[in-house]
Amino acid sequence: MYSWTLITGDIPHTSDARAFRQSLATFPTGVCLVTTLSEQGKREGMTINSFASVSLAPPLILWSIRDDARSADAFICGPHFVLSVLGAVQRPMARHFARSAADKFSGWEHEFEEGIGGCPRLRDCVATFECTTYSRYQEGDHTILLGRVERHGKTAALPLVLHMGEMGSLLDLAETARTARTR
């Protein structure tokens, strides 16, 4: 049985926004870390789940950033970014980079090396996409960033997945769902 909510224009009320987010959360997504270097040379990084492939020729990916995010200017104005698909064992890193902090890399320096344009590149993850910013589109309260993939790599590690507000491996989330259904 579906629970329907009619959206008539923008979502002005907190309860409407919460219901919309809960509906979006039913779609399982991968968890990624995106990093860049600001014009002042400051490393910026954030956890995202708004990643998608766009084109094979040229090789393009996209992700989106909330315009009022603390590091939005660095990502929106920057010429490069690195997007890393996180592994199931990297849940603590995903949570760390999802929170606001003056220097998100503090304590995590050993996990990174220099990537395209000096951007921090995560050493170990499921996949890495080093990108030149290709185009930007401001839509609603987010900016969509398209990146031309200049270099990429992958491993056989299990990905970190987000579903219904929970992060874990596919196996973890399947077990959580099974347990919830039997209650």
Image (cartoon, grey):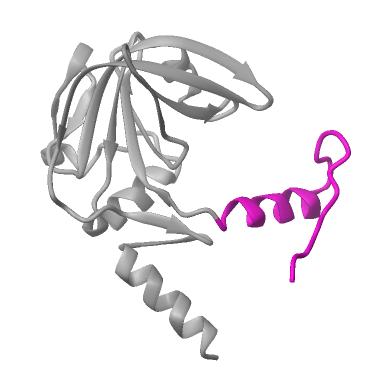
- Viewer-proximal residue, 104 or 54? 54
Figure check: 155 above or below 135: below
Image quadrant where one finds the C terminus: bottom right
- Viewer-proximal residue, 7 or 95? 7
Q: Left or right: 16 with respect to 40?
A: right
When asked about the image quadrant of residue 108, the answer is: top left
Which residue, as the protein is rendered here, is positioned at the far bottom? 183
Is residue 89 visible in this depiction of the protein? yes
Figure check: 174 above or below 134: below
Is 6 included in the stretch rendered in magenta? yes
**Residue occupying image coordinates x 45% and y 84%:** 179
Residue 98: image x %, image y %?
Answer: 42, 45
Q: Left or right: 21 with respect to 47?
A: right
Figure check: 132 above or below 177: above
The span shown in magenta is: 1-26
Is 55 included in the stretch rendered in magenta? no
Residue 42: image x %, image y %?
Answer: 31, 20
Is residue 43 visible in this depiction of the protein? no
